[in-house]
Image: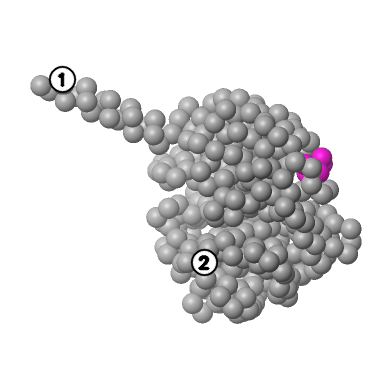
Amino acid sequence: MKKYHLSLLLIAFAFASSALAQSLFVPTRGSAAVAVIDPLTDQVLTQIPVGNYPIRLAMTPNRLKAFVSNGNDGTISVLDTVARTNTATIPVGSSPGESAITPDGARLFVVHQRGDNRTCPVDVIDTATNQVITTVFIPGHWDKDILFTPDGRSAYIANFSAGEVDVMDTTTYQVTTIPTGAGSRRLCISPAGDRVYVANNKARSVSAIDTATQQLIATIPVGQGPEGLGVAPNDEELWVTNQGDQTVSVIDTTTLTVIATIHTGDHPQRVVFTPNGAQAFVENGYADTVSVIDTASRTVIATLPTGHNPFEMLITPNGRKLYVANASDTTLTVIDIPSLTVSDTIANVGVHPFEVVVGP
């Protein structure tokens, strides 16, 4: 009887582990490919050829399809994430960059790193047919980020060259302009979806926008060169990386004031939180390290080595691993979160891995 129960337990555990297993997709800018990694073994499973200089990847909500922005080709590669093949190429404008898929999975919005000095295109693509539905032109020539409100009715675009956030109605494609600050670069949205925050990289500030009224609530002074943004899981704090100051500003989301400044490493670029909010991880691009911060005490409790120029990070859904894309070499650094140690370095991912996205 005991052997029987043990066998059932082992089968159930194996099934659960398999069900939880998800692959990781990593665009590698210098290899014109997307690497697929098994997070159970931390091994590269395959590399999917795409266009030249793949810089960003957006996944449909069901994770069965991915769209890759090929920055130097003016194209989008369409991936079957189960078969792990490139199934189509969509021509778009020059220098496609950040992209996002509507919450219902029906449309892909692609912003462009360069325009014609007067306007910059946003391509809207039907994810079922892979056809461009429309192209909307907004002022300026350099867009850096895009996200949707949870209901999918509005797309927020960080307009770096114009120093504003452009809000697009996803039904009418009409655009509302919200002046923020010079160098509007990165966006994040609150867990409730009621606020969008933008880092104004050249203005040493962060702007908060009310998504119901599409009005600017406040602009908060922070450090030099703010870029990465992250809202704590409890929605009480917004953390902002200041590249020029080697610091993180902690903003109280009720008072919209800076309540703490934390020193990290050289050129902090991104910040991510563990699911329980107990720790924050900040990668320091010029120091080749990740700072681990205890969010309660707001102190750095560990500094962990990475590869060259850590850029994007991903915490696995179970909160046990942090993957760091080292944008100036060919590796991913794997950090074991419970022990706060580097558990692995995944070699031969591809030249200049840029970000990490969870797939099926």
From this viewpoint, is residue 170 visible? yes
Q: Residue at x 58, y 72 (%)?
A: 211
The mark found on residue 291 in the picture is: none
Q: Is residue 22 above or below residue 337?
A: above
Q: Is the stretch drawn in magenta largely helix, strand or loop?
A: loop
Would you call the spot at circle 1 few (<14 residues within 10 Å), some (14-19), or many (20 or more)?
Answer: few
From this viewpoint, is residue 283 visible? no
Position in image of residue 27 (x %, y %) = 66, 37
Q: Residue at x 50, y 40 (%)?
A: 335
- Between residue 181 and residue 171, name the one nearer to us: 171
Q: In the picture provided, is 229 more to the left or to the right than 138?
A: left
Q: Is residue 123 above or below residue 338?
A: below
Q: Which residue is mark 1?
A: 3
Place residue 308 in its image quadrant. top right
- Whether pointer 2 and pointer 1 mark residues with C-beta atoms closer than 8 Å, the reply is no
Q: Residue at x 59, y 78 (%)?
A: 213
Magenta extent: 71-75
Position in image of residue 341 (x %, y %) = 47, 39
Q: Residue at x 67, y 37 (%)?
A: 78
Q: In the picture provided, is 160 more to the left or to the right than 219?
A: right
